[in-house]
Amino acid sequence: MTQSAPATTPAVLPAPAWPDRRAVVLLLVMLVWSGLLVLRLGRLMLFPGPELKAAVTQDAWFRGEIPAPRGCLFDRDGRMLAWSTHHFALRWRVPADPRRRAEDWRRIRRYLPVHEPATPWPAGSEATVIADLNPNELAAASLLCEGVPRLRLYGWSARHRLPGDRALTAYLGETRLVDGRECGVSGTELAHDAVLRGVSGRFRVMLDRHGRWLPDSWQKESDMVPGYDVYLPIHFPSGPPAAKPRRPSSRP
């Protein structure tokens, strides 16, 4: 006689617990936000809008001005009384790294006749390597600036006048540099400033990530118009014309 095994009762599993409603809502919000973000990034990559294009172009291009040479002042006989000359200086942002500083200085001495200063320039300062470059030095410095991003060329104008007495000097007047341009501030320089000043030209050039000009990227946006010369009704060295006497009048 065989004995049968007792019947086993199946185990009852607990019902699965549903996630919290707040967690479900938060998960859905995150999924929707992630999807919108991916769609937005894809749209910007495939179809960049005009605002993005303008921002990228503004960061990549550098715009500058070409100062117009100021006109000269002549007397009635054609003798030059006031004229301008343009000058350039080479400046160097001294690096803090001694090795980079030595490498920059080696390149500078290779192209330009410079000497080590008696007092070393502080790191991070902007040192004037050559205050007034001659034409040959200017050509060499222009090539040097392309290889050394810490070098910059700075230009300025100087106004010269024929020496004379105080009356003539006051009659001609003075100029002042405003945003790199010569502007008349007194005398004849101020009276004829609109004619003497001319119109500056404008250009743009693309920069690399180091702020250096990219070759063959220079573009002219507007032409530079030099200032006109002005002939004055005086004869040097007799000086400015005398003031006309006032006519007699019954009025005070």
Image (cartoon, rainbow, N blue to C red):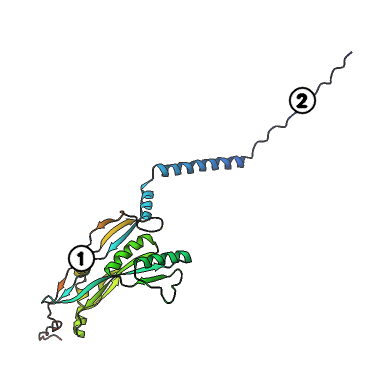
Q: In the image, 192: left or right of 181?
A: left
Q: In the image, 194: left or right of 118?
A: left
Residue designated by label 2: 10
Residue designated by label 1: 226
Q: Looking at the image, which is closer to me, 24 or 49? A: 49
**Residue 184 coordinates in the image, percent (x, y):** 24, 73
Say what secondary structure mark 1 lies in: loop
Residue 8 appears in which quarter of the rendering?
A: top right
Say what secondary structure mark 2 lies in: loop
Q: Nearer the viewer, mark 1 or mark 2?
A: 1
**Residue 112 coordinates in the image, percent (x, y):** 34, 68
Q: Is residue 186 above or below residue 208?
A: below
Q: Residues within 10 Å of mark 2 (few under 14, many from 20)?
A: few
Counting the numbered discs, the total is 2
Q: In the image, 234: left or right of 18?
A: left
**Residue located at (52% from left, 41% from top):** 32
Indicate the quadrant containing the N terminus: top left, top right, bottom left or bottom right: top right
**Residue 27 coordinates in the image, percent (x, y):** 57, 41
Q: Is residue 197 above or below residue 59?
A: below
Please tell me which of labels 1 and 2 falls first in the chain.
2
- The extreme right residue here reads 1
User: Looking at the picture, which amino acid does disc 2 mark?
Assistant: Pro
**Residue 37 coordinates in the image, percent (x, y):** 48, 44
Q: Looking at the image, which is closer to me, 93 or 235? A: 93
Q: Is residue 105 above or below residue 173?
A: above
Mark pair 1, 2: CA separation? 103 Å
Q: Looking at the image, which is closer to me, 163 or 179? A: 163
Residue 135 appears in which quarter of the rendering?
A: bottom left
Q: Residues within 10 Å of mark 1 (few under 14, many from 20)?
A: some
User: Looking at the picture, which amino acid does disc 1 mark?
Assistant: Pro
